[in-house]
Amino acid sequence: MNRSGSSIVKKHLNSRTVNNTTHILGDGATNAEDELGHDFKQRLQKTLSHEKTDKTRRDYRNRILRMTKYFQQKCFRYFEVGVRKNTSAEMNDPAMYFYDKYEYDLIYAGLNVDYVLKFLMDQERTAAGNLRTKADMQKFRDAIKWGAQIRGEALSQECWDKLDLYLFSYKRQVAAGKGNGDVQTKEADPITKELYMLICKWASEDGNTMVDFWTKTQWNCMSRCGNIDYLGFSNFRIVLDAHAVTHDTTKKDKDGDRCFAKHIYANHEYHYLCQWTAMGNYCALYKNELGQTQKLFMWNTKDGSAAKKYQEQLKALVNKTEERRNIVSSHCRKGHFNAYGLRKGAASYASSGTTCAPSLSSIAHRGDWSMGSVFDIYWRFLPVGDHYLGQILSGKDPMKPSFKTLPPHWKMANPMGHPLIREVMNANFGPILKTHSEADYDPTGLLLRCLACMVWHAKSFQEYIAHNPSNELVKVPFYNMRGSEIDALQQLITVEPTPDVMTTVTGVPPHIETTCQMKAIHDNLIQLLAQTRISEDNQKQRDEQLKADLVAAVHHGIEQNAISNGNITAKGINDIIQKHQDATNKQLTEHLQAMLRSLPPQFQGGQPAQIPPPGNQVQQGGGLLLQKPDQGKYFYTERFWSVPEDFEFPPKPNLPQALRCWLKGIRYGNNYVKPFRQLRPKDLPTTALQSQMRVEWQKFFKYLENNGLEMPSNTSEEVTEAQLERTTDEMWDLLEKKVSYAFTRKNAKSHCLSPWGF
């Protein structure tokens, strides 16, 4: 039977034979250091330091510190005999983990457990009077156990027995206290699918790409925040029609022995649920930062800082308006809404969204919950259930035939060989491709799939930008492309099976095939019914026409007979009046034509006046529509301006984004604003915009041009991505020469335009 590495180690430790009296061979030999190496202990300690994280070790040290301070204040006599002050050598020993700040430690050999129990009883309740959780109290015992191991000191069996008995009893005390609301709890309520969908919509509306990408990734992976924190391009790979994400380690599996692939699928129906699209938007917006590291969220930051940042932004997102807060309160208890609820919510939805739910083993594996050693070993080799689970978590409805749909993908086997696709890839992900394309985790294939989904859902995100011009997605080059270019890209995308590219939909249960067949029968019946109704309508029309023709023929015969007999009828009078009107209209037309011929030549025979597009029409001289003047494009407040009335400059653009706006312009809502270098401050509608143009934009780019930066002389339509990239590189070279002091700051290249003002 195959076993994981940790299972083998545990079995070995439980069955080992110990002999502490045997002499260690070679111990104390004079040449031991020469053979082992002078850095043997340092190298060994570097490996052993991975046994626990620094966060866990610091938590243990803090708990031991709380015990020593308690003994010093309330049990001083025991403090004198049961607590030691660390020596300077111990404080500086990295293997002791005192971090140059913990001066006291317990004496573990001979530890009096009664004093420990007294301390624990005084810690049972918080300042608010609630019982602490059993896990919180258990960590004090874990800290004592770890501290004794570091010191190499053993605790008595009586000590362990009393601690275990106390914690077992305290666990029951907590269980009894829960019914009375007497227990401190910070557990997160499950975030339901409905609330998850709303969070994704809000993130897209606000342009918060980090919250959008992180939320979808955590939901689909069904992981803790800490596991998303560490993800990088190396954790993603392409598997058939899915992206497989594999964690390096998890909270329950520090060895990484049971970390297996979690399959994430695109959503072709709902843009706000598509994780692939969110990944593309995020990478395009932060391409410069991701060009320096393969980690998606940790940019030269400490472990866990990205998760903390995400939780802060998530709370800010839902607290933005009172309406959002009220919606969240209808799904979660007050104080119990946080990111950890995504994992619970995803598991609840996957297991209850349909009576034909994925297997519990698949849900347990994806959520990193153990089912016991035997199940954990064997079920990990059955990934089909995870494919089905991934399809459900992507937001597809397992009761509809559309569940069996491939993700949006390119119609060609080599998309990078197409000039337009290659240009768009370089424009949106250039620094990432340049840095990581030679690595074994080359993300080019992933980003090609993400771009395909961005193209598929382009209209929805352009609408977000149109309604909220401060949306950060306005900085993404793709969403500033011309409509004709996006249309050309959409012609290259399909969700139909494509030979040599993508042909098989994975994770589809048998009942979906039955549903698809029933839908085909239903569609055929609907078509047959429609054809039957058309035939009936045609026959009815023919009958009505035949009846009308017969009545008309009889009526005509009667009229003709009446006229020939000299009788006056209503029909005869109408015919006489109509002939008189026709003759009058003819005479009036001839008279008007004669008047036009008498006018000067410039008013004769010319082409009709060109009508400006909507929003630019000027009505003068009794309704004559004039062409827009050359100096502007948008007419409001009785004059022409160069930008729309509600125009705002892109919020906090970095230098490459600002250079793109300067040379190529920007898509603003449903309009295009010409290259910023062609804008004149006096043609901007407000003094704030005029000031921002002079102080931030013109001042910076005039500085570059005055110091030798050669800008492309083409019009905006002719500036290519290659020219833009070359100009960007030349800009950085010039700045590093002229203002080298600025590059001593951390992440200087990621700073926005404002701090660079000269």
Image: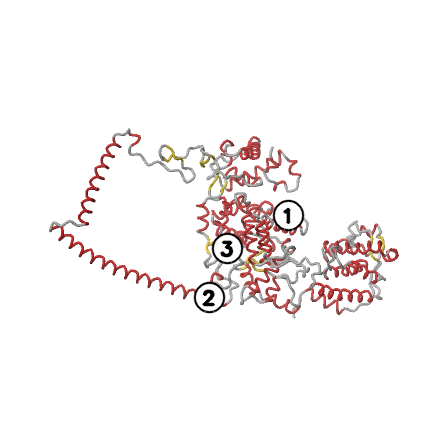
Residue 33: percent from left, percent from top: 81, 55
Residue 743, above or below 393:
above
The residue positioned 61% from the left and 42% from the top of the image is 750
Residue sitting at the far bottom: 1
Which mark is drawn over residue 515? 2
Q: For mark 1, what is the residue?
A: 299
Q: How is the image coloured?
A: secondary structure
- Looking at the rendering, which quadrant does residue 198 occupy? bottom right
Quick one: 220 or 616, which is closer to the camera? Answer: 616
Q: Please, what is the three-letter code of the amino acid marked with disc 3?
A: Tyr
Cα–Cα span, label 3 and label 2: 21 Å
* Front disc: 3 or 1: 3
Q: Residues within 10 Å of mark 1 (few under 14, many from 20)?
A: some
Q: Are marks 3 and 1 in contact (CB under 8 Å)?
A: no
Residue 81: percent from left, percent from top: 88, 57
Residue 300, above or below 380:
above
Q: Are marks 1 and 2 in contact (CB under 8 Å)?
A: no
Q: Please, what is the three-letter code of the amino acid marked with disc 2?
A: Thr
